[in-house]
Image (cartoon, rainbow, N blue to C red):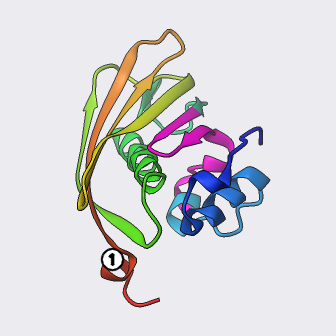
Amino acid sequence: MSLSVDLDQFPQQFHGFLSGIMSGDFAGKPKGLAKLGIMPEHWLKHIEPGHVRYVWPNDGSHDIQPNRTFGGWVGALSDHIVSICMFSALKEGEAFTTQDLQIKLFRPVSQGDISIEARVINRSKSTGYVEAEWKNAEGKLLVKVLAWKAIRTVEAIHGPR
């Protein structure tokens, strides 16, 4: 993995995720990601607070028809990416849950390297708004993702720890 991250930019609660990605030994990978075959340990190429860039090497294994990626897969990967982007912008002791996720498909997602970039556009005390764009190797917009995240304390989302 060629990802290099200054962990001091992020709250301690995010270090385990980032360390797993940087080492390539992602033992604590969430089951949902593993079952879906989402591999941030290989696809995450850049991260800083409020900004991530992934490159998904689309080999066609998620196609519903030749050269047409299944929309459900696009949704699952999009949800992961905007969530990691939001996670990167949290403060220590904060967590979030998705309030709304919108996915706009402009073109078929066909095989090849797909660049997916997400940014926190606005963050208040209780809400984060994240946008992501999927582009093909020619730079054409394939997918636009809009996500609203409810920001709460870790205890409010996950219960006492």
Magenta includes 77?
A: no
Q: Position of residue 37 (x, y in %)?
A: 58, 52
Name the quadrant of the N terminus. Answer: top right
Q: Position of residue 153 (x, y in %)?
A: 34, 75
* 43 on left or right of 78: right
**Residue extending furthest toward the bottom:** 160
Q: Which residues are magenta?
A: 35-55
* 100 on left or right of 77: left
**Residue extending furthest toward the top:** 138
Label 1 Cα neighbours within 10 Å, binned few <14 / some 14-19 / many ≥20: some
Q: Position of residue 140 (x, y in %)?
A: 41, 12
Foreground residue among 32 and 59? 32
Q: Residue at x 47, y 68 (%)?
A: 92
Number of marks: 1
Q: Quadrant of residue 134?
A: top left
Q: Position of residue 75 (x, y in %)?
A: 35, 44
Dot 1 corresponds to which residue? 157
Which element type, helix, strand or loop, lies under badge 1?
helix
* 67 on left or right of 153: right
Q: Residue at x 59, y 67 (%)?
A: 12
Above or below, comparing residue 144 to residue 128 in the picture? above
Above or below, comparing residue 43 to residue 11 in the picture? above
* 24 on left or right of 60: right
Foreground residue among 66 and 144? 144
Q: Residue at x 62, y 49 (%)?
A: 39
Magenta includes 40?
A: yes
Amino acid type, label 1: Ile
